[in-house]
Amino acid sequence: MIIRLYICIYIYMSCENCNQSLLNGVYYCDTSDYRVIDNMTDKNLIFIFKNHDLLSDDIEITDNIIVQYCNYQNCKYIKYPDEDQG
Ligand SMILES: [Zn+2]
């Protein structure tokens, strides 16, 4: 007798749009767009979130923050870390 248990004990973080598990990445302000990259060392593009019209010397360029993201079927969901704790 085979008993298969599908228990979701990892309810930690999932996409609010499509319920896929979120992946770790970096939200990065590039010279022409906001994008999600894998990490600040390699800066491999995962997906472009949206374009912006910032000047190339804008203080916001190269801003980055560690996020969790979902790119399942082009979902482009980004979960930002909680801010203003206390
Ligand atoms: Zn999703």
Image: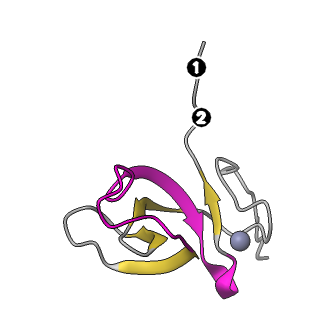
Where residue 20 appears, as percent x and y from the top left, is 69, 70
In the picture of the structure, the residue carrying the numbered disc 2 is: 82
Packing grade of label 2 (10 A; few <14, some 14-19, many >=20) is few
Residue stretch in magenta:
51-75
Dot 1 and dot 2 residues touching (CB under 8 Å):
yes
Left or right of residue 8, residue 46 in this image: left
Q: How is the image coloured?
A: secondary structure
Q: Residue at x 26, y 61 (%)?
A: 40
The quarter of the picture where residue 26 lies is bottom left
Q: Nearer the viewer, residue 37 or 29?
A: 29
Q: Residue at x 39, y 70 (%)?
A: 37
Among all residues in the image, which is located at the extreme left? 41
Asked which secondary structure carries label 1, the reply is loop
Residue type highlighted by circle 2: Asp
Q: Is 38 situated above or below 78?
A: below
Left or right of residue 47, residue 64 in this image: left
Residue 45 numbered tag: none
| Residue 62: in magenta span | yes
Residue type highlighted by circle 1: Gln
